Amino acid sequence: MDGESMKDEKMKLLMLAGTQGLLRNTNRYNGGGWVASLQREIMKSYSRQITISLAFPSERNFHEEYDGVDYYGIEQIKYAFWKYQQKEKAFCDRIKKVIDCVQPDVILCFGTENGLGLACTVTKVPVIIHLQGILNPYYEAWMPQGLSWNKWLWGNKGAMLTWLALKEFKKREMKMFHACKYFLGRTEWDKGICNLLAPQAHYFYCSEMLRPEIYNSAKSWSNPNNRIKRIISIISSSIYKGGDVVLRAAQILKDNAPFDFVWEMYGLSDIRQWEALTNIRHEQVNVEVKGVINAQQLVDRIMSADVYVHPSYIENSPNTVCEAQLLGIPVIATDTGGTSTLVEHRKTGLLVPVNEPYLMAADIIELINSPELSVLLGKNARSKSLERHSPSHIVSNLMSILSNIKDEYHGSL
């Protein structure tokens, strides 16, 4: 079949994702669900132009058809510190089998962290990697103040296994950057990293889908005027996410703020690693650890808070910041990685240097004492975010990119 006739056929897209997409989707994690949201939007708006198959890391290899979509489990690499090369080869062999089964026109891979981007090393079918976090630069900013790799690893078996796996996964990621011809990104940071590590590749801009419960929420933040001020952060338990910065900033606030406050941390249930690092107990500085919440609960918590704070040491484009902006709450975020693409200082939020708890505390006080500024920043961020994360714009842009890559590929056959 020639290239011209291929243009008239339905595009076959294989999605390689870290989650199972819409396969019996029950994802309630605070930062999850965006791959499923994107899959849903593509299937809703472009079902006549495209068919989707989706593969993801799993406990075992399997194939299942669900709601008209073929899903493939790819047995994930376990115990990466032992015989890693043999395991990576088996992993790649399984990816190749899935590709041969689906026979896609284009492969869309989400992220470099889970290894599925190795697809670009086992097939001539065009692979486009949608950048998320990037391990090699993340590794350089992994450790917070007062903690070195040696100190973290000493006597910590779990940390040792993480470190050994990271060493292999960094090398694996570099294979992807060197082999892949197409990347999608959404920040100046990931564009710069891509240009550095993959000069042979074409970089496309594509924003990230947010969960529909957030994007379509009828609620928009207005100053709740709480007597006891409420600060909110949503982070995972990864050591680089800045839980230590929260504790130190909360201590500074407790010593200096002219108001009572509570700082609520969602997305995790244990911050002992940061308490040990800072020698600060969260209860002593008005920090409450609240656990994981779903999308609707997130909306409710945002509406009742005074300010959102993102303290991470390294990020690309944290969805929690994007969702907070879309809901209209004023955001303070560390100026790291790609966050400055999302947050324009004093226009759509406030940026503070990484690991600067004093300025973070000062900015919290400023926003709480300046309701007009808080409302303005939140309003500006919401307007920008609604445009940036528009589902129809995202999917239209993505479909155009995929179609162009497909046509270029089939035209070269």
Image: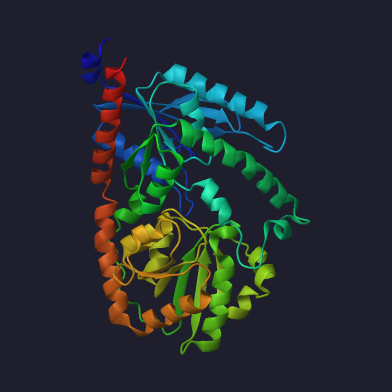
Q: Residue at x 32, y 65 (%)?
A: 344
Residue 46's spot in the image, x, y percent? 25, 32
> In the picture, residue 369 is in which quadrant?
bottom left
Residue that extends furthest to the right in the rendered view of this protein: 155
Q: Residue furthest bottom?
A: 258
Question: Which residue does the image show at 25% across and 15% down from the upper left?
Answer: 3
Q: Is residue 271 visible?
A: yes
Counting the numbered discs, the total is: 0
Horizontal placement of 93 versus 16: left or right? right
Q: Is residue 323 above or below residue 259?
A: above
Residue 102 placement (x, y as % from top left): 42, 20
Q: Residue at x 39, y 65 (%)?
A: 300
Query: The N terminus lies in which quarter of the figure?
Result: top left
**Residue 220 image position (x, y, % from top left):** 29, 66
Report which quarter residue 77 is drawn in: top right
Q: Using the image as rendered, state which of residue 107 and residue 288 is in the foreground.
A: 107
Q: Is residue 305 visible?
A: no
For the C terminus, the quadrant is top left
